[in-house]
Amino acid sequence: MKSLEQLINECKEQAFDLKFTRAKEWKEEKEGRVLVGYMPIYFPREVIHAAGGMAVGIMGGGDRKQIIKGDAYYQSYICHIPRSILELALDKHLDHIDGFIFPSICDVIRNLSGIFRQQKIGKFVKYMDFPQNFLPEIGGVFYQQEMEHVMHYIKEINGVEVTAEKLNHSIGLYNRNREMIEFIYDIRQEFPWRLSIEDVYHIIRAGMVIPVEEHNAILEQVCEHIKENIGEPQDKIKIVVSGAFCEQPAVGLIRAIEQAGCYVVDDDYMLGSRMILGDIDTTTDKPLEAISQAYINQSQYSSSIYDVHDPKEYRLAKIVKDRGADGVIFASASFCDPSLLDAPIFQNAFDRMGIRYIAFQYSENINQFKVIKEQVGTFSDSIKLWEDEPVETV
Amino acid sequence: MAQEAQKEKSMIIQKEMVSGLFNDLAKAKETGKKVCYTFIPGNLSELIRVFDMLIVYPEINALQSAMRKKSATYIKEAERHAHSEDVCTYVKCDVGMMLKGNIGPTGEKIPEPDVLLLSYTGCFTFMKWFETLKREYPNAEVIMIHTPYQENAEMTPQMTQYMVKQLKEVVIPKFEKVTGIKYDEAKLKRHLELSAEAEDWITKIFDTTKHRPSPIDAYFAGVYYIGPINIGFRGTQQAVDYYKELYKEIMLRVEQGLGPITPEGEMKEEKFRLVVEGPPNWTNFREFWKIFYDMGAVIVASSYTKVGGVYDMGWRHDPSRPLEALAEYCMNCYTNLNLPQRVDLLAKCIEDYEADGYLTNSIKSCNSFSAGQLGMMREIEDRLEVPVGFIESDLVDPRYFSYSNIKNRLESYFQMLEQRKLIKAHEAAEA
């Protein structure tokens, strides 16, 4: 077994390899392999795996890619991630990726799919219209058809026919992946000092760009390590970070939140890897239906999923309660419509419920956090020093 | 003189239609009519009429508030309630208006919704908007109909079936429950016949810009022309009559060789013909328009007038397949088209209407339109070698309308168009 430090260092390298080296190597190892890039938030990677492909998460350039060409396509009042994704594409970082999937997150990502079409990037471009109707016989069927389109595109490239057996096997791998990620969060709920949130972030993000089998092997070892009583507890409050599900904050910001006095016991940074809560059925002869059912019945709340039947503010409040968190940090990417439009819903509800929170905005390429760090530090102090009332029961 | 009188007639008809709508809304409690809030793109007016409901369009309230100089106050009110500076100002204006008592343009309170019908067409923010409204109106029945995006530039049978199933199994049963009225397909078909007729007329109206001079401005006046077909009158005889009358007036202008009517009278000389992409600014609508007509610029086509339905490519509501027609209508609204489709449509307008230039009015708080506009502009420039221009403003937030900046940019753009005309004339003479 590798040391925890070794594992973390490997993940750090993979997570921010904007040339997607491991994915490229994997593709070249065997004929017929296909790489499919997908944008945040979520895509059922099982489908690509079963088709002989590998899903590659494209989470933007962060603070590690200078934007020159991408800015020419976007006005100043549009978020940063589309310009950095386009920059990656125009600088040929994505050349070995065969096709691109744009999940229905917001109008910006939707229209980015149009720019990829205009620029003729990749062998296929698919805007993945996730159903906003949650009846299995209506939205569920439509979702299965959407997944079939993706399978069709991949088959046109490599000729692979997806069978129920193959898909069930892939689902099993991702079930295990999610299970271990949740195990890490569960351990951190009690012992957040055993693994910093920065390390967790690198470990999960690495899983977006390497084969799931390799990621599972890493996670197995990480889970073993953190079962041990390692690290030293510090006097910090516990908080949940919400709103950073698409454009990612720079790692420096993720680190700064914890350094400023907050253990992050849950977050939505890598929401796509944790979107399905619990396992998807692997024993059915209709695995697409199983994936669809899981999306409809077992999804985490998200700003991109219509929530009127299951309001998100109560779901987040439940996470806060279940994790024993002292408060919430709403971190939204600048100009992020889904996150910012949800802000009043969350904040007005949390005012009523007595859940403490702060809110700020960031951009993936900004690496100066002094003001945010002070804000977070003050939030932490205010709870530590003037703690008087428990969080209202939900 | 006769021509001016005829122009007034269509305006009077429209004014009566709109004031009638707001009067009906004001009396909704007395008459017991149910009230349905919905959006312009993908509005299911004909179906709502089958259930005899009155319709409120939150984005129309917002733009009217802006034209009445009330949007700044409403937006500030919403921002006091945690709404970000950087999101759709229609949403904030609507929420602010609600927080301030929901007083409509006629000075009377707009009734609360019995139904929130979210047809979610081409704009992700609509979904977030109705999530917000649902929390403000917890007793309203909320109905979502998910319109698939034309990602592959097509409406597939699967997409249509997805929508038809939602109509049959979600929308119609909920309408029946709220109103107590049984779904009447024959009545829907009659409305759809009238819709198709109105769609024929409005297509002919916007096609009159082929004439030189163009008898209408298809953007600044166009937003008035699309009023009846978009705000609930599609599917009625009133709408058909209005468009017939309007067409008659416009054709009279064509016969007389007259240009568009502006707020300061008839435009005397048509110097430039433009196609405009993006919604207009509503807070300074008159000032904005004046910059154009003062410079002799007329808009011969605009994407904004297609936001409530694209009819100029031949699509019509088909009464013989009523629910399929409603589904296709929703999927075929402008912002539900993918970017290559939008470019093709605008390029066709530039060619068909012999435009001298293509101008983008980029709206700060509308990503559905704005994200991708620069790429579209670049492609149109490359494909058609037409001069492109770019300005920025906002829908209803006056803080983002900078008159001087816009005027400077437009003046430079018009100078460029002028110069190009001279060069072309010179080249033609030499040839």
Image: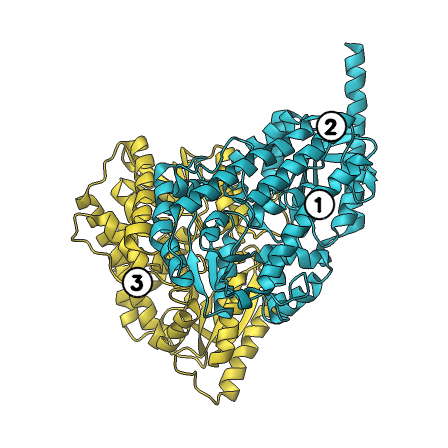
Residue drawn 35% across the image and 37% down it: B157
Q: Which residue is mark 1?
A: B11
Q: Which residue is mark 3?
A: A277
Using the image, name the chain to which the residue with label 1 belongs: B
Vertical relation: B336 (above or below) B254: below
Vertical relation: A106 (above or below) B426: below
Camera-side residue of A254 and A389: A389
SS label for mark 1: helix
Q: Which residue is mark 2?
A: B254
Using the image, name the chain to which the residue with label 2 belongs: B
Q: Position of residue A117 (x, y in %)?
A: 48, 35
Q: Quadrant of residue A278?
A: bottom left
| Chain letter, colour cyan | B
- Asked if badges 1 and 2 are on one and the same chain, I answer yes
Camera-side residue of B87 and B143: B143
Q: Residue furthest bottom?
A: A388
Q: Position of residue B141 (x, y in %)?
A: 43, 64
**Nearer to us: label 2 or label 3:** 2
Disc 1 to disc 2, C-alpha distance:
18 Å
Q: Quadrant of the N terminus of chain B?
A: top right
Disc 2 to disc 3, C-alpha distance:
65 Å
SS label for mark 2: helix
Q: Is residue B398 left or right of residue B233?
A: right
Mark positioned earlier in the residue sequence (1 or 2): 1
**Amino acid type of the residue tagged 2 in the rendering:** Val
Q: Quadrant of the C terminus of chain B?
A: top right
Residue B88 can be seen in this image:
no
| Chain letter, colour yellow | A
